[in-house]
Image (cartoon, helix red, strand yellow):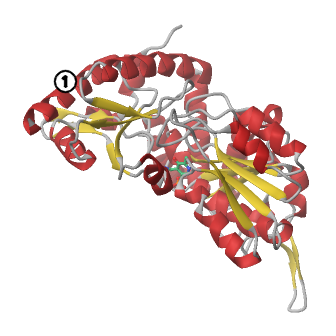
Amino acid sequence: MNYNINSIRSDFPILEQKIAGKPLIYLDNGATTQKPKQVIDSISKFYSEINGNIHRGVHQLSQFSTDAYEEARQKVRDFINAKSETEVIFTRGTTESINLIAHSFGRRYIHRDDEIIISEMEHHSNIVPWQMLCEQVGAKLRVIPFDKNGELCMDDFRNMLSNKTKLVAITHISNSLGTVNPIREVIDLAHKAGAAILIDGAQAVQHTTVDVSELNCDFYVFSGHKMYAPTGIGVLYGKKSWLDEMPPYQGGGDMIDTVTFKKTTYAELPLKFEAGTTNYVGAMALGKAIDYIQHIGIENIETYEKKLFKYAAEQLSLIPDLRIIGNAKNKSGVISFLVGDIHHYDTGMLLDKMGIAVRTGNHCTQPLMTKIGITGTVRASFALYNTQDEIDKLCSAIERVKQFFS
Ligand code: PMP
């Protein structure tokens, strides 16, 4: 495999930074990834040469911008292998995509005494919108537990499914445990029960090939900023058959066909779900991030990161008193841990003093932490530019943290 890590690293200007006088070791990629200069420069070029509001103008800049926006949609479509570009809706990110589904799909198809199934390892953004919906329509939220290794209890899931189940919403990869869920099986089981299925891909699309047509999920959502694109742009993939039937989420410009004071008719997909001026520059830059990933090759990234992940898990588990939280057989992207009885926040603060950026806390998965009986973890999360050398430095730094507290 031709994976030129030095060349890749040189694409990311921020990695040259020093933090606390030490070379930055950025291991907070689960929260957000850094951006390659190809993405950063594309934004500057766009505003310097191309910018005009999309879809509304006859003038050339508006046309150029519209073309760039729609070209980005095609790139997303190809990246996840959607059947049609009309199945790709641009949103602010995973959170907005889930809220859109909760408002639009939820209000139309979920009624009193219906059930929505999520899991104990969901991010708050795949819990709270469903709780809000359940309160509004009188539906019930059911929660699949995970076992001591951090794997979904599939038997419990099977038993929960019934003709009351209208939607199953599950994360592809857990942002706190790193568990890769058996989503194919989850999708098939949900469909057999007659339920729709939403996959939260926020921690997956940057690490592994996602083919929504093959998966046959009804909805798949993700955020640009976790896959080398800017903040404020994300994707809702939805099957056309659902999106056609679902009512709009927000009203405003661009999402209409005709407006009179008596009645408004709505635009066709995908614009029906894109009210107002969208983040079209962000969408264009997401397209550039996809180009960047495709240029390296998502399979090459996956192979490289798997090796790196295995190395990190092995090295961290050699540290006495370090407890890895989440021991699923199939893990990716993030390793959560605690060091002795040192508070996760203290570990994170001291690592920061050594130039190492990790995340501490509950990672927006409070119910997961409550179940394990902890308040949070230290989380190292990886991206295509991390190296074994950085992991060695992380391990030595953890030893220093231990010495400090001993
Ligand atoms: N789901 C998962 C699994 C996540 O990791 C995150 C981000 N931490 C989100 C949802 C929310 O993503 P965003 O804040 O970009 O909307």
Left or right position of 109 against 134:
right
Viewer-side residue, 166 vs 70 = 166
Above or below, 70 against 245 in this view is above
Q: Residue at x 82, y 45 (%)?
A: 190
The image quadrant that residue 153 belongs to is top right
- Give the image location of residue 201, x and y in percent: 62, 42
Determine whether, in the image, residue 294 is placed left or right of residue 258: left
- The local crowd at label 1, few if under 14, some if 14 to 19, many if 20 or more residues have their Cα within 10 Å, is some
Residue occupying image coordinates x 58% and y 41%: 146
The answer to which quarter of the image holds residue 71 is: top right
Question: From the Cβ of disc 1, is ligand 1 less than 8 Å away?
Answer: no
Image: 203 above or below 384: below
Residue at the image point whose x is 57% and y is 44% from the top = 202
Residue assigned mark 1: 396
Q: Classify mark 1: helix, strand or loop.
A: helix
Whole-percent x and y of residue 405? 10, 39
Closer to the camera, 18 or 346?
Answer: 346
Is 319 above or below relative to 130? above
Q: How many marks?
A: 1
Image coordinates for residue 273, horizontal then vertical, percent: 75, 64
Could you say where residue 59 lies in the image, as x and y percent from the top left?
70, 62
Query: What is the quadrant of the C terminus in the image?
Result: top left
Whether residue 269 is visible to the viewer of this picture, yes or no, is: no
Q: Residue furthest bottom?
A: 261
The amino acid beneath tag 1 is Ser
Q: Residue furthest top?
A: 1
Q: In screen coordinates, is 382 left or right of 76?
A: left
Q: Can residue 164 be seen by looking at this rendering? A: yes
Q: Is residue 371 above or below residue 53?
A: above
